[in-house]
Image (cartoon, rainbow, N blue to C red):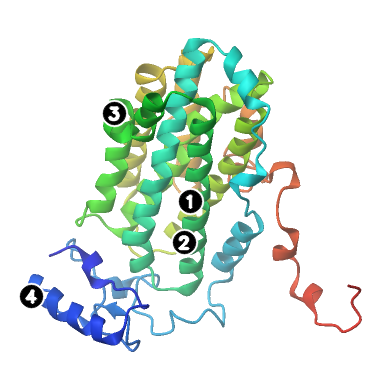
Amino acid sequence: MGDTRQGFFCCLLLEREAQSFVSALKGQSPEQPLELCGCAGCLLPTTGFVPENGLDPDEEPLLRKNPRRFVIFPIQYPDIWKMYKQAQASFWTAEEVDLSKDLPHWNKLKADEKYFISHVLAFFAASDGIVNENLVARFSQEVQIPEARCFYGFQILIENVHSEMYSLLIDTYIKDPEKRDFLFNAIETMPCVKKKADWALKWIEDRESTFGERVVAFAAVEGIFFSGSFAAIFWLKKRGLMPGLTFSNELISRDEGLHCDFACLMFHYLVNRPSEERVREIIVNAVEIEQEFLTEALPVGLIGMNCTLMKQYIEFVADRLLMELGFSKVFHAENPFDFMENISLEGKTNFFEKRVSEYQRFAVMAETMDNVFTLDADF
């Protein structure tokens, strides 16, 4: 079966252009006939997405064709909607992070510390784009309930902010144009980054895997692939270094925690979930790659952290993710980093619900009654 992305067409184009595009697509992929949906500019396969694994999406409430997917109200999934509103309340922009004090700190760092930080930032700058690729190419097209689509849409926005922030950090710290270009192209220039990127990308391209397997895989990307690097940057905060970098890290770690939590919520809505054995296989594989990344390819020893404890921390994070997904622990590891308690995956004020310095847009989460229209307001 051809790439399902060819079944999507921008609603902003004219009907005539859409019709000609339909004909072209039919010529390219006769095994997947496409028709216009009710909207003149919108192209969707009228039979719905059918993956090559043979599972019928109609068996899954999240994936079942939904003619009401274009309208948000009435809310059918209040817990999913609440998480979308949480994401809204936590919105921020790169311009709000002050980097003016970072450069003097950067100039005083050891060469090994600069090497480590710049390479971690290079991974992050590329990884958010990969997450968005999955959201645009797969999840947003497969999931048919508007509440989840709202969350994915907002996640795409904030992942762009993350990517901009990481790119801005590289641009601020690295003055040599060649070194900057090397870091901005990390997926091609750095084998250790490429390995992590390839693992994530294979799930986007995989037409055999189930939606549930891919939800777990991207929960692992945002919950495990990011966790060790977050911890490494928080290690710098413990030392009183790089306030702009560490504050942006707080904001981003909170966002990614919410994204990981959302993946767990979506997983619990699935009827056909992957087996515990399959979930463990995906999680353990991600753990091995992350441990190799931060203890061999780009060892945290470069900034004075203990590699053995970092391995343990990654296992601790993986265990907490498994429990959030409804399964038992694999590693039974304890958190070795006391400074990470505030963003660990444990407790109510955890990695998934972290609020940094009360930084959130409170009005978004206010009760509906607080927003009653009045003519008596002071201006």
- x 63%, y 51%: residue: 92
Q: Left of 62 or right of it: where is 199?
A: left
Residue type for callout 3:
Thr
At label 4, counting other C-alpha atoms closer than 10 Å, the crowd grade (few under 14, some 14-19, many 20 or more) is few
Residue type for callout 1:
Asn
Q: Nearer the viewer, residue 329 or 194?
A: 194
Q: Which residue is mark 4?
A: 27
Q: Which residue is mark 3?
A: 189
Quarter of the C terminus within the rendering: bottom right
Q: Nearer the viewer, residue 46 or 320?
A: 46
Q: Nearer the viewer, mark 1 or mark 2?
A: 1
Examine the rendered structure and indicate whether residue 149 appears above or below residue 250: below
- Pointers 1 and 2 in contact (C-beta within 8 Å): no
Q: Secondary structure at mark 2?
A: helix
Counting residues from the N terminus, which is met first, the one under dot 4 or under dot 3?
4
Distance of label 2 from label 4 (alpha carbons): 32 Å
Q: Which residue is mark 2?
A: 152
Residue type for callout 2:
Tyr
Please tell me the numbered disc located at residue 160. Answer: 1
Residue 253 % position (x, y): 57, 40
- x 19%, y 77%: residue: 21
Q: Left of 252 or right of it: where is 197?
A: left
Q: Secondary structure at mark 4?
A: helix
Residue type for callout 4:
Gly
- Pointers 3 and 2 in contact (C-beta within 8 Å): no
